[in-house]
Amino acid sequence: MSIRKLKNGKYQVRVYVGTDEVTGHTTYKYRKTDSKTSAIMIEKQLNEAVERGEIVIKELEHLQPQPYTFEEAYKEWWEFYSSQDFAQSTKDKVARHFKNHLLKPKLFGNLRLDRIIRIDIQNKVNKFIPQYTQSKEMLGYAKRVFKYAVDSEHIICDSNPLEHIQMVRVKKVPRREVRFYNEVQAKMFEHGINEYYQRGNKFLALFTVLLRTGMRGGELCGLKWKNVDFGRCELLLNGRMSLDGHGKDHYLKGLKNGDDFRYIDIDDVVIDKLKAWHYVQAQQSMLKGQPINDDSFVFDVLRGRMYRQFASFLEWYNCNHAQKLPYLNIHGLRHTHASLLISSGMDLKKVSDRLGHKDIAVTANIYAELTPKARREVADVFSNIMGDTKENH
């Protein structure tokens, strides 16, 4: 009998699944329930499940096709993506996007690609986008994984599921008011840091170097004293600090654009601030019993603390000065350096080389938006070409 009553009053259901032809082992599926009516219903459900192939002989379970998920598609896609010639910092950033967001169960992590419903994708995206300022960038990487799944025929559809959803508004970037400082604001900033920090302070030197060289934050944190040449007034950049997959700083040889090194000329102000900080750093390290040497980092500081110091300075400045400094992120000092050079007529190729861009087109694209001063100069130059005078109007 497939249903029998047990001594404890419950009912046991036994359904035949099959017999393995190789081992001769017979498999049954068992269930217990409280009533005969319930047992009859369970028996029917189990038999239907066997017929559909959802319940199989134990020895054959490993042969059953397993559901293909977004996470599995990501792992396969990642093998290809990580082998490409991208900067390690870029790969680490993408890996963090997936680990911290895209592979979470509430988004795509446990999504079965054989059961995709467009409205479910839309609902997930609607909840995700407003939470983060970089949500659309992150979804761009998810879109690549879906494309891989479509192209490899893991999804039985003709197009990428993320191509058919409506993108809601992204969360606004907090507080950042401008992309870079103009000439007046740059001078206010430099005057402010000299007022806020004492001579010889690490962050006075650090922010001065960022403003006056335009180097990347990772390059600055990776700078060593052996690569600072006060006599020739130049810095040799041949390494950088980058975040690993766990969000920790680690040193990498070479630069972000793939170059092994580049030189940056520095002015007297930068030299003065670096020398003052070098003296203070040497005194501090001696007190700790860990004297610095040529292989020591110029700025032994985590980037997280650097960002916090930058925000704290701006907050102090605007609380103590009538003329306010707009808030920008620390990378804005690099944009400020480049923008002021370009708006002053500096050759774009020279600016590109100083910034360490791989191609002059990168510089042109980033700084296509000219500063107001440069736009005015362009108009005035054309007016002069045409021989315009006030009397002509």
Image (tube, rainbow, N blue to C red):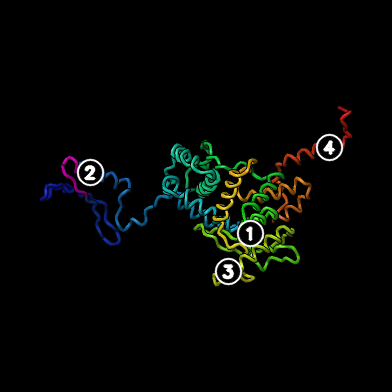
Q: Label 4, on which residue?
A: 382
Which element type, helix, strand or loop, lies under badge 2? helix
Q: Label 2, on which residue?
A: 42
Q: Is residue 195 left or right of residue 265?
A: left
Q: Is residue 232 left or right of residue 168?
A: right
Which element type, helix, strand or loop, lies under badge 1? helix
Identify the mark nearer the N-term, 2 or 4. Answer: 2
Quarter of the figure with residue 232:
bottom right
Identify the mark nearer the N-term, 3 or 1. Answer: 1
**Closer-to-camera residue (152/200):** 200
Q: Which mark is residue 220?
A: 1
Identify the mark nearer the N-term, 3 or 4. Answer: 3
Q: Label 3, on which residue?
A: 285
User: Label 3 sits on what residue type?
Assistant: Ser
Residue 39: image location, x then y, percent:
19, 43
Up/down of 182 relative to 218, above or below: above
Identify the mark nearer the N-term, 2 or 3. Answer: 2
